[in-house]
Amino acid sequence: MDDIKELALKSIFKEDGNARKEIYRRAELGGVILASTYELYKQRAEDKWHGFTVPAVNIRTLTFDIARTILREAVKNKVGAFIFELARSEMEYTDQSMSEYVSTILAASIKENYRGYLFFQGDHFQAEQKEFFSENKEREVNFLKNLIKESIEAGAYNIDIDGSTLVRLKEGDVKNQQRDNYLLTSELTSYIRGLNSKGITVSVGGEIGEIGVKNSTCEELEAFMKGYNEEKEKKGFNPGLSKISVQTGTSHGGLVDASGKLIEPEIDFETLRKLSNEARKYGMGGAVQHGSSTLPEKYFDQFVKTGAVEIHLATAFQNIVFDSKYLPEELKEEMYDWLKKDFISRREKGQTEEQFIYRKRKKALSKFKKEIWQMPQDSIDKICEELGEKISLIFCKLGVYNTVELIQEIYSK
């Protein structure tokens, strides 16, 4: 085994801090620069570029090999505008801290001789609703602050604050509906601005509508931003948000029918276009679309036409791993049997076994992390070939081919 993968394995399975430091050191010497999308999105707000939507990819398993695949496709197609991200919830059910995640992908960049800018992002840094609206509120907010601090220290200079779970739609006034959301988002933005980020302006995103619930409106965006900017003025921090996540008809992971087949959703692209235009009035790059990876291929170039600045992609890549004929059948059966035993209490009423497995199989990624990594390398390589085709198609549809020069031009100044 080559020494860079050995370092990655030490970092992952032995939590070896020295191995992680060595990976960071070698990546920097090799020409990898950790960056924030702040300047990129600021220029989009100023209409200095258009014609592509930035993909943000969550890698839930086989992080080293899948990252190598994505980086190879990026180099081959001269893609500079792309993000690696990890959500708060994913950290738990994939057993990956942000420092592990970043160092593993940096190890992949060393293996691929990648040179240039890399963007890492904390996705859905979300307040747990039950904890927030209880006597544990302060503890929950402090947890988020610690998570943000650790992520920025790891090199994730892009943080998506998700207060959408705090929106109270039963409140009559739209601003009151968004109140807890904009208060938390402004408090955490202020906290971020006070952290040491090595002279880098961290890109901060907000979210006005919980994914999978009702579609967002311009009225909600205006109410959220009015409250957020009032708090920004009071707290005295600057800059504010770079982007805003909205709901337009998707759901995380996609929805499946009784047989386990994905159901095609109805996406309101016109609403996404209006929200992106509205976001730019507030100096943001545009709106962000979540829950996108499982959509039909015909949809992806539509995001570019709406002016969406970013879309988030996770489950489709996870699905490629689980559904690949190269995933050892015995391992798959072991994971599924474990889910049926340990998660049966979480099976929803009326849910078929296929639907249950589809929704819950991501929970097996932590339990079987080592077994997945120990698959035959030939099998991993074949899975990554399938994934490479998918990421190449998405890069193409989102218009990010040949964006390396733009990234270099923006960030080399």
Image: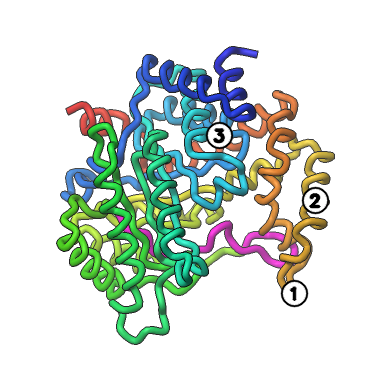
Q: Nearer the viewer, mark 2 or mark 3?
A: 2
Q: Up-down: is 94 above or below 104?
A: below
Measured as percent of width and height from the top left, residue 188 is found at 32, 55
User: Going from the N terminus, do you reach mark 3 or mark 1 first?
Assistant: 1
Secondary element type, mark 1: loop
Magenta stretch: includes residue 278 = no
Amino acid, disc 1: Gly
Left or right for 217, reference 359:
left
Residue 40 in view (yes/no): no
Secondary element type, mark 2: helix
Secondary element type, mark 3: helix
Which residue is pictured at 56% across the width and 48% down the height?
90
The circle drawn on residue 388 is 3
Which residue is pictured at 49% across the width and 68% down the height?
129
Q: CA distance from mark 3 to mark 1?
A: 36 Å
Q: Are marks 2 and 3 in contact (CB under 8 Å)?
A: no
State the extent of the magenta-drawn residues as a range: 243-262
User: Going from the N terminus, do you reach mark 2 or mark 1 first?
Assistant: 2
Classify 10 Å Cα crowding around label 2: few (below 14), some (14-19), many (20 and above): some
The circle drawn on residue 338 is 2
Q: CA distance from mark 2 to mark 1?
A: 21 Å
Quarter of the rendering containing residue 323: top right
Residue that numbered label 1 is attached to:
350
